[in-house]
Image (cartoon, rainbow, N blue to C red):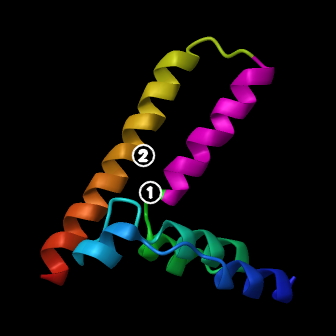
Amino acid sequence: MVLLLKTLEDYMLPCMSKTHFGLDCIGCGFQRSAVLLIKGDFVASFFMYPALYPMLLFFAFLIFDTFKKIKHSEKLKLTLACLTLIAAVGNYTLKLFLTN
């Protein structure tokens, strides 16, 4: 398992926005956050990229809804999608203003 995690860290994709323009993109931190989550460091994962948790919840709900239909699934999908978007944009905005 440790070897797999080390391998994942070796093959992370660089952020093209940060590489070429010096600015974080809205997804910066997602890969590192996912690796931290797999390692079990939930708090560090949250601080690295807070939108990961609502995103995972959203995708889990989409998969669950595929197999078992839920009465108000469209409203729940929209709510989870909006929560994910708000978390991602909020994180991005904080990064822009706190790092500069």
Query: On the image, numbered disc 2 is attached to which residue?
Result: 84
Vertical comparison of 98 with 90: above or below: below
Crowdedness of circle 2 by 10 Å Cα count: few (<14), some, many (20+)? many
Q: Element at badge 2?
A: helix
Give x and y (percent) for residue 62. Answer: 65, 31
Q: Residues within 10 Å of mark 1 (few under 14, many from 20)?
A: many
Distance from disc 2 to disc 1, alpha carbons, whole Å, reads 6 Å
Would you say residue 61 sits in the magenta stretch? yes
Which residue lies at the image location 71% right of the left edge and 78% below the top edge?
8
Residue drawn at point x = 28 percent, y = 53 percent: 89
> Can residue 23 be seen by looking at this rendering?
no
**Left or right position of 18 against 31:** left
Is 64 in the magenta? yes
**Could you tell me residue 32's position as x and y percent?**
55, 76
Chief SS of the magenta region: helix
Q: Nearer the viewer, residue 69 or 26?
A: 26
Give the numbered dot on residue 42. Answer: none
Residue 6, given in percent of the width and then of the height, sits at: 74, 88
**Residue 81 vertical position relative to residue 2 in the rendered view, above or below:** above
For the record, the magenta segment spans 52-68
